[in-house]
Amino acid sequence: MNTIRYYSLSTIKTNLLHFLTGKVFSALSTITVLLLLARILSKDIYAIYVLFQAMVSFVGMLASFGITQSSFRYIPELRSKNNNKAMYRFLFSGVLSRFLIFGFVMLLVFLIREKLAGYYNFESWVWLLPWYLLAGWFRLTGYFLAKVMESLMWQKSSQYTLAIAGLTRLFMVCWYYFVTADIDFQKVVMIEVFVEGFTLMILVLTTLINWRSDDHKDIGDQEWWVKNRRRVNRYGFMGYLKALTGTLYGNAPNRMVAARFLPLSSMGEYGFAGSISMFLRRFLPTRLLHGMIRPLFIDRFSQNQNFHELNKMANFTFRVNLVILVFSILGLVLAGKPVFDWITLGKYGSTAYLIAAIIGVLILESLLSQHELICLTLEKNGIIIWGNLLRSISLGLSLFFISKLGAWAIVLANAVGNFLAIIVVWYGLKRSGKLLTFDAHLIIRIVISLIIAILTGFLIDNLYHIIPFTLLSAFIIFGLLIWYRSPFSDDEHNLIHRLFSRENNKTKISGKQFANL
């Protein structure tokens, strides 16, 4: 059989420019639309909008049925082993089943819309929910397909499509807001329907084009399904069980709890804070790169079964996340309130410290996600289930304190749940003979640098009271500290240099060089 290497470092480097270009435009359009809608919509309407988003996300969590988890695990493996015939069968059947199942569950939500409206107090907007469910149907299917395309290194097709969709949404919102001065909640939802439907259509077309142009699409053996059916079904079942045990944790369940127990104005504030954190979660470098990192983990482990390599890769990706998140916390603590007040016409400046705390929880989520990625690679979903149960239970504990602490109760519960889940998953891996180790001294460097930068920023602010100068000074100090006492090893620095250097992308670099950090 042909021994093509689909997941060598040279392949990743070739796709990196398309990946970053698409993600930069997607991130800029997403955050701009988010802030514009926070400025346009009242707190009460914004609360309903984020509740609709939460419902769609919750449907996506409940309706995976193991197909999503199995696709993300075995499509890269089949590609890595050049079994393209079986891989494409998996891809097309997965997309079709996702589309039909999501549509069926959205129909069920449509049938109980009146009860949901009464429970969450949005009776006056219940007529608009079916339209948003239609947008959600397109969005969930498109998200699944885009993630699969990322894992196949079809970055040019997937990222540029998503970037164009994001810019289209931004253009339409800006047109109605700045040009016609006629935008409301109904128009926002209709924009979502159009953009999500357009995105899904283009993703499907580009997938078919990539398939037809693949000279190796007929390589492989369909008998793989006969030999591995029990393995795939078992993994899918455990993956779905993992998803079910985590349904009560995350941005969507948090919003639904807040919508039920908080006043609409407070829900609007928490919804805005959650939207900012969701943006950061979505566009974190290692979160973005999960579509590329996941197949690389699977490829490396399928080649040599070396757990130590996975451990080093996970440590590196976590510290990349940590540096980015710490930069965000620094900016929010020193300048979040006045900036948000200015952008949102004084509505959401008070959420700056709440958002900073949510980002602190994201740091724990980032660490746990690396544990989970290793478990998924090792096909040990059972370990993750116990961690997910703890996270789900922790959200229930927040109900005892939400009347006194408001949204802070949810944030604190999330932090406790993630911390306990990390311990449980780490212990589960240890019992299975896979001991995860941490580069604690490198992590401590980042934390100390953050503390020094914050204290210096407060001192400069007290002296000059010029927010841009304060923020710039704090960022420069933090950057210098990171440069002087780097949280990355020499091998990691060399890897980053090779990824972003201008050397010929066609130069063959072994994927093992990534693992040998």
Image (spheres, helix red, strand yellow):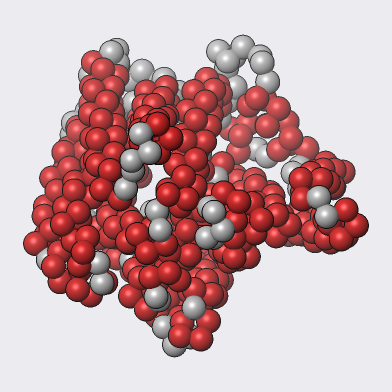
Q: Residue furthest left?
A: 111
Task: Determine the residue positioned at 52% across, 71% down.
Answer: 411
Can residue 305 be seen from the camera position used here?
no
**Residue 242: percent from left, percent from top:** 34, 63
Q: Quadrant of the N terminus?
A: top left
Can residue 157 be seen from the camera position used here?
yes
Query: Is 193 above or below relative to 459?
Result: above
Task: Determine the residue positioned at 21% across, 64% down.
Answer: 124
**Residue 424: percent from left, percent from top:** 50, 72
Task: Determine the residue positioned at 28% across, 43% down.
Answer: 187
Q: Nearer the viewer, residue 139 or 147?
A: 139
Query: Is 101 above or below relative to 123?
Result: above
**Residue 49: percent from left, percent from top:** 33, 56
- Residue 237 is left or right of residue 334, and the answer is left
Q: Quadrant of the C terminus?
A: top right
Q: Quadrant of residue 88?
A: top left
Query: Is 226 above or below relative to 379?
Result: above
Q: Nearer the viewer, residue 453 or 194?
A: 194
Q: Quadrant of residue 33?
A: top left
Q: Residue furthest front?
A: 181
**Residue 210: percent from left, percent from top:** 29, 19
How many marks overall? 0
Q: Quadrant of residue 387?
A: bottom left
Task: Determine the residue positioned at 76% across, 45% down.
Answer: 468
